[in-house]
Image (cartoon, rainbow, N blue to C red):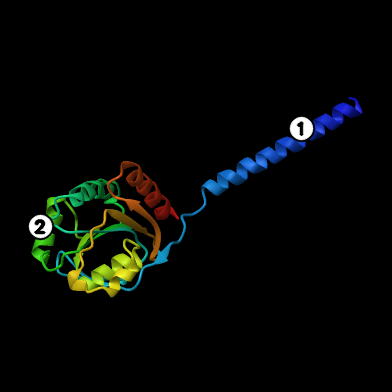
Amino acid sequence: MTKKRVLYLAFFVVLFAVFYGVLTYTTDFAKVKLPILNTVQNFYFIKQDGSKVSQQEVKNRVYVAEFFFTTCKGICPKMNKNMKAIYEKFKKDSNFLVISHTVNPSTDSLPILNHYADSLGASKENWWFVTGSKSDLYRAARESYLLDDPKNNSKNIDEQFLHTQFFTLVDRQGRVRGVYDGIKKDEVEQLVKDINELIIE
C-alpha cells in the first residue's frame, strides 16, 4: 500500500470517527432531560371526597395539573376529554396522578366536583378534583404551574376569572417540567411521551 493510500485511509478513518462522535452526541442531546421550569409551592386543597391534600400526598408521583370549571361549555369539555385519554393510559400506574383544580370554587362544591369526577370515570385515588380558596387556587395556577401571569395576583381576586386550556407536567420532586396546550392533539401526544419519560426517570 502506497503512502498516499495510507494517508487517504487515515483521513477517512478520522472522518468516520468524527461523524460517529457527532451522531452519538446529537443522539444523546436529543435524549436530554426535560427542562426544569419552576418548583411547585406548598399547597393545601380539598379533593372531591372531602379529604385534604397537600404536597405530601403527591411526593414521588408524576402528575398533570389543570384548571377548569364544571359549568364550562367551551374549552373545558375538550380539555377533559383529552385528559381522560391521558388518565386511561396511566391509571394503573400508582406513580401517576391528575389534579384538576376548579377556578370557580363558589359554584363547584364538593358534591358537584364528585359528580363531575364520576361522569368521567375518575378514581379519587389518582384523579383528584380539588377546591379551596379562590386566591390559593389562582396563586397555584400562576406561581406554581405557570398557567397565567403571576402579576395578576395583585388584582382584586373577586373581579378575576382564570380560564386556561393548558396542562402542566410535574415530576416526582415537585418541579414543573412542561406546559402543554390541552386541546391540541400534537401537544397532548407529546405530553404522553414526556409523562412516560418522567415515570422512568
Please tell me which residue is depicted at 33% across the width and 74% down the height of the picture: 42
| Numbered label tally | 2
Q: Viewer-proximal residue, 76 or 152?
A: 152
Q: Viewer-proximal residue, 48 or 188?
A: 188
Please tell me which residue is depicted at 58% across the width and 44% down the height of the picture: 26
Give the residue type that dot 1 points to: Phe
Residue 105: name its quadrant.
Answer: bottom left
In the orientation shown, which residue stands out farthest toward the right?
3
Q: At which x and y percent is residue 140?
A: 29, 68
Give the label on residue 12, or none. 1
Helix, strand or loop status at disc 2 = helix
**Quadrant of the frame with the C terminus:** bottom left
Give the label on residue 126, or none. none
Q: Which residue is mark 2?
A: 115
Q: Viewer-proximal residue, 171 or 106?
A: 106
**Quadrant of the frame with the N terminus:** top right
Give the residue type that dot 2 points to: His
